[in-house]
Image (tube, coloured by chain):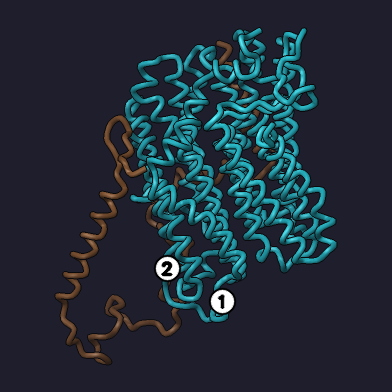
């Protein structure tokens, strides 16, 4: 038996081990701690890529915890899967790759960025726990297990958002996030209880197979949608994001972006793989589309007027989530109509999923460049910055690439995913595309403002001593820049190998169910 | 790997764009090369034009601060921005309230 069969478990186990060993590694000194932080993150990213390769070649991977055999999802004599099952289809594997790359870039960046601070043993442990939670959320095939990983990620992120505990703003941001997140978690737990009560199962595949839409199922669906939409920063439940993203250290914000995408993953796993065609009416798809449009427009409106660079970028995160909700919402709308799915639904889904990887990469990079500015100039207020392109040329170059990508300027990757979303949503209602286009124009406007005020203009006397950030931070930013350039230059490869398999896996509810319970219950 | 991305309504070809970019860049550089290079350095021809005003010595006075950028846009949408600011109160009670209200509305819509 090849060790590759254990990849689903290893992708979660390696960062979990990293979290527990981090305080011990930190006792050996700064170099050992940094080596551990970067090494474990790199190994996790490598394992995620191997898992993605395996899933593309061999199909959905199943891993059963505690069974006699790792692939024994339905023990003989039993009609329901009873153990914790990791179920990794192309969408899950895609998410693991995206998340682990962001985690690696954030870890690399943090080696230099965090060196001025104490408590880094705890930082490293929490960072790995957050990575573990995120990866667990996207790899599990079990609803309760999903809740547990969501809570691991949440608790780790509360600690990391409040890491600079001498700043009252950081404590406040963490507290607000904790209150909202805990209520969201309770909603998820109640929804799982509803489904467990009805079907005696928490396996996503088993619940999906048995699901018949009644009152309990509808209420569970609403609770899951609202809680997960809040976790990914959807308007009007987005209020925690500007506070949390602004106050968290930059490397952590990069990872928080990936964690928000894991929540978005959960939202679409519930809608497509668990409920699927049994959603029935168009209320849920339209709710997701409307929330997406509101997120796009309100997020970007708030971003345009910000003068604090990380807060501006945080509002853009809200706006960008809207694009993904719009794309995947249109896909959900077309789910029960094969003709609509062929005409525009699948293209919208591809656009949404492509935007998901694009967003994670360029938004992660933008937060890292904001962190680099804060590290070098000591301020996040754009009014205090100016003329930094002369002294920070590499950071400027990477900022321009990320800003052009998020604004959807051709030929960057953001343009390709937005094009797919514009054209497919136009077929549903032209106003949806128009709103998306207006959002894109306002996104460009606000990043022109950042570029003009922070990087251009005459050098300010008080910034005369500013110099380029250390190599670790540049390397962290470079990782994401390289991925963005790759996605820009090879959009066809990215769509065929990364995006399309993920979109196909998401619409293939029967495949998701049969991978765990074979011929059904 | 090298083919076009088809959206079902049109297509995107990054390599055509890059070829066009290089052709356009070549044209721009050619037009630039046609400009006069015999301007007199150190005279007023060489100075910054600052709306017929004297150029401030302190560079920070030249720059429009971020808080003033898009002033006209924000002023024109003052009513909209006042509502948005009201919505973003910073109060945790409001954060939770929005989530509960949206959940309640959606429950009603889904159950109907």
Chain at numbered mark 2? B
User: Percent from the top left, x then y, of residue A309?
Assistant: 54, 59
Mark 1 burial class by Cα count in 10 Å: few <14, some 14-19, many 20+: some
Viewer-proximal residue among A258 and A515: A515
Q: Is residue A239 visible?
A: no
Q: Which of the 4 image quadrants contains residue A496?
A: top left
| In the displayed structure image, the side of residue A60 where residue B38 appears, left or right | left
Q: Is residue A416 above or below residue A194?
A: below
Viewer-proximal residue among B66 and A400: A400
Image quarter where the C terminus of chain A lies is: top right
Q: Secondary structure at mark 2?
A: loop
Q: What residue is shown with label 2?
A: B64
Q: Secondary structure at mark 1?
A: loop
User: Percent from the top left, x then y, of residue A53?
Assistant: 55, 37
Q: What residue is shown with label 1?
A: A466
Viewer-proximal residue among A439 and A132: A132
Alpha carbons under labels 2 and 1: distance apart:
21 Å
Tell if the residue under mark 2 belongs to the same chain as the one under mark 1. no
User: Percent from the top left, x then y, of residue A40?
Assistant: 70, 51
Q: Is residue A114 above or below residue A467?
A: above
Taking the spot 62% from the left edge, 47% from the top edge, the residue there is A45
Residue at the limit of the structure toward the front, as seen here: A1
Mark 2 burial class by Cα count in 10 Å: few <14, some 14-19, many 20+: some
| In the displayed structure image, the side of residue A395 where residue A169 appears, left or right | right
Q: Which of the 4 image quadrants contains residue A221?
A: top right
User: Percent from the top left, x then y, of residue A160?
Assistant: 72, 51
Chain B hue? brown
Q: Is residue A368 visible?
A: yes
Chain A hue? cyan
* Total marks placed: 2
């Amino acid at each position: 038996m090849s060790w590759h069969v254990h990849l689903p478990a290893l992708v979660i186990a390696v960062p979990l081990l990293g979290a527990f060993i981090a305080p011990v590694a930190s006792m050996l000194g700064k170099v050992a701690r940094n080596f551990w932080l970067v090494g474990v993150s790199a190994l996790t990213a490598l394992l995620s890529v191997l898992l993605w390769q395996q899933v593309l070649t061999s199909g959905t991977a199943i891993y059963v915890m505690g069974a006699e055999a790792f692939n024994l999802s339905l023990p003989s004599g039993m009609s329901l899967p009873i153990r914790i099952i990791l179920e990794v289809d192309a969408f899950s594997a895609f998410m693991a790759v995206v998340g682990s790359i962001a985690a690696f870039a954030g870890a690399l960046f943090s080696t230099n960025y965090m060196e001025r601070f104490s408590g880094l043993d705890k930082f490293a442990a929490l960072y790995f726990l957050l990575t573990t939670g995120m990866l667990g959320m996207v790899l599990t095939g079990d609803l309760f297990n999903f809740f547990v990983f969501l809570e691991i990620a949440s608790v780790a992120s509360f600690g990391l958002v409040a890491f600079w505990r001498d700043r009252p703003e950081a404590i406040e941001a963490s507290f607000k996030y904790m209150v909202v997140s805990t209520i969201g978690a309770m909603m998820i737990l109640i929804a799982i209880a509803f489904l467990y009560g009805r079907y005696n199962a928490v396996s996503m595949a088993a619940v999906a197979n048995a699901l018949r839409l009644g009152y309990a199922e509808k209420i569970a669906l609403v609770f899951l949608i609202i809680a997960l939409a809040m976790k990914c920063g959807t308007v009007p439940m987005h209020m925690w994001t500007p506070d949390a993203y602004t106050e968290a250290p930059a490397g952590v914000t990069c990872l928080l972006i990936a964690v928000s995408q894991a929540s978005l993953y959960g939202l679409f796993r519930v809608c497509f793989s668990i409920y699927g065609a049994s959603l029935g009416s168009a209320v849920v798809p339209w709710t997701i589309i409307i929330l997406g449009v509101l997120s796009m427009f309100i997020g970007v409106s708030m971003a345009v007027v910000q003068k604090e660079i990380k807060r501006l970028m945080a509002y853009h995160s809200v706006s960008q989530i809207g694009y993904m909700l719009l794309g995947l919402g249109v896909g959900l709308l077309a789910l029960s109509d094969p003709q609509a799915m062929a005409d525009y639904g699948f293209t919208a889904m591809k656009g949404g999923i492509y935007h998901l990887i694009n967003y994670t990469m360029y938004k992660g990079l933008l937060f890292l460049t904001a962190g680099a500015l804060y590290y070098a100039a000591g301020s996040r207020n754009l009014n205090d910055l100016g003329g930094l392109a002369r002294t920070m040329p590499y950071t400027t170059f990477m900022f321009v690439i990320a800003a052009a990508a998020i604004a959807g300027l051709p030929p960057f990757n953001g343009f390709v995913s937005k094009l797919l979303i514009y054209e497919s949503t136009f077929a549903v209602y032209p106003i949806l595309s128009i709103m998306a286009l207006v959002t894109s124009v306002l996104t460009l406007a606000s990043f022109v403002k950042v570029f003009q005020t922070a990087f251009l203009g005459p050098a300010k006397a008080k910034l005369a001593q500013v110099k380029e950030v250390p190599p670790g931070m540049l390397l962290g930013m470079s990782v994401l820049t390289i991925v963005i350039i790759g996605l820009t230059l090879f959009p066809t490869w990215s769509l065929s190998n990364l995006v399309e398999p993920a979109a196909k896996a998401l619409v293939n509810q029967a495949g998701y169910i049969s991978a765990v319970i074979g011929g059904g219950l | 790997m090298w083919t076009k991305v088809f959206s079902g309504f049109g297509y995107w070809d990054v390599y055509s764009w890059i070829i066009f970019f290089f052709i356009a860049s070549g044209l721009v550089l050619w037009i630039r090369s046609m400009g006069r290079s015999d301007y007199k350095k150190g005279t007023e021809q060489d100075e910054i034009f600052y709306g017929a005003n004297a150029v401030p010595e302190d560079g920070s006075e030249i720059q429009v601060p971020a808080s003033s950028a898009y002033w006209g846009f924000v002023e024109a949408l003052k009513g909209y921005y006042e509502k948005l600011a009201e919505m973003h109160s910073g109060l945790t009670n409001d954060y939770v309230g929005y989530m509960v209200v949206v959940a309640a509305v959606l429950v009603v819509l889904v159950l109907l």
